[in-house]
Amino acid sequence: DAGDPTVRHRSAALLAWSLCGVTLLAFVVSFVFIRLTWSDPTPDRFGFRGFQAVFFVFSLVGALIASLRPSNPIGWMLLGGGLIAGIQSIGDEYSIYALRASPPRPGADIAAWLGEWVWVPIVGMTTTFLPLLFPNGRLPSRRWRVIAWLAGGAIALSAVAFLLVPGPLSQTPSLDNPVGVGGPSARNVLEALGGAGLVLMVVTTAAAAASLVMRFRRAAGDERQQLKWIAFAAVLLVVGFTLTAVGYDLALVLTIPLIPIAIAIAVLRYRLYDLDVVINRTLVYGIVTLLLGLVYAAAIFLPQVLFVGVESNNSLLIAGSTLAVAALFRPVRRRIQGFIDRRFYRRRYDATRTLEAFSARLRDEVDLNSLTGELLAVVRSTMQPAHVSLWLRLPETGPGEQAGR
């Protein structure tokens, strides 16, 4: 029965994982074409392919969400983004292979042409529609429909303009656009339209980010925690962009998959309330790594400045620096953990100190009434409940009788 929810759910799961399988096949085929031209890679080719390949994580996460929450469009958008990235990867790699083969293979221009415009829907979906619809797959309100329509129009305008631009392809100048329309004047017009579409995409991306801020200010409970996850992943992505800008190319490849992973945790509501622990550990170990890295660098390079003849590859110097960093790790981590708890998790820090003080008094306290009062005070201070009751089992009154308040 096609109307049975169970049947529809299974059909959606089958479709989702089938699309994920097609995406995986696309990246495998791309790798085959890379192997066929392995001896002469183009500049930065493998770094760019690594950037493309991370979109398989989008597809994998999308299949998971779509199979478990088929009514939420976020999973299907992630699936679509991964599939389009796989198609682009095949096109790019086949065009390189077709041009270098002897004799050249047919279809190089069509394959290269795909790379001119299919990236636009990927960028558009991930930067505008995902934030607009996160986490429940619905717009924040009816007023945001204008932004959604503008985002869709911007994506369509840029994609169609770049699709039809005549003349040499930007990524492969030796090939002309096989579906280009008009001459040089048409090229100028279409490039201008494509640029206008990209500017509009930037505007709608900023509006989509503002919608997340608005959702967060109005949210409570699970939804607020869901938005915290995506915000945390976005911060790490910004760090990845920054590290990439200063030369650490692998940073972006490692941080981009955090976005779909955070989306999966939020949409599926899996271990939502572990986020505060994740942020705490990230702050602590990030600062510890930075400080110990500076200590290690200073231990390696300062002797070279102070003493003539000391080399940076001196084995004793390296061993001593490594041992110093290892010895410092635990005390530095403990101090930074205390600072982070005092500065950012003050309530939990105060609660911990209160419980430690109560434990110390508990060893010496013998008066039951005093102990009861202190216990109730500790509970009120740490947990801040609306009401506190203490039930004690006394031999003379029997079990279950209330002896405190």
Image (tube, rainbow, N blue to C red):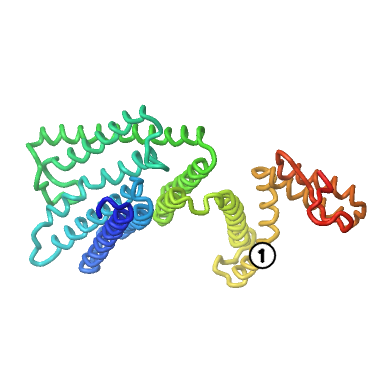
Q: Could you tell me which quadrant the C terminus lies in?
A: top right
Q: Is residue 186 above or below residue 118?
A: above
**Residue at image location 29% in from the left, 46% down from the top:** 122
Q: Amino acid at mark 1?
A: Ala
Q: Is residue 388 above or below residue 25?
A: above
Instruction: Residue 321: give x, y in percent of width and height.
Output: 63, 65
Q: Looking at the picture, tell me which residue is in the foreground, 385 or 330.
A: 385
Q: Residues within 10 Å of mark 1 (few under 14, many from 20)?
A: some
159 on left or right of 206: left
Instruction: Residue 12: give x, y in percent of width and height.
Output: 29, 54
Q: Looking at the picture, tell me which residue is in the foreground, 5 or 213.
A: 5
Q: Is residue 243 above or below residue 154?
A: below
Note whether residue 43 is visible: no
Q: Could you tell me which quadrant the N terminus lies in?
A: bottom left
Note whether residue 91 is visible: yes
Locate residue 191: give its quadrant. top left
Q: Residue furthest right?
A: 367
115 on left or right of 236: left
107 on left or right of 129: left
Instruction: Residue 163: give x, y in percent of width and height.
Output: 16, 43
**Residue at image location 60% in from the left, 66% down from the top:** 310
Residue labelled with disc 1: 324
Instruction: Residue 361: give x, y in percent of width and height.
Output: 87, 53
Q: Secondary structure at mark 1?
A: helix
Q: Looking at the picture, tell me which residue is in the foreground, 398 or 31.
A: 398
401 on left or right of 225: right
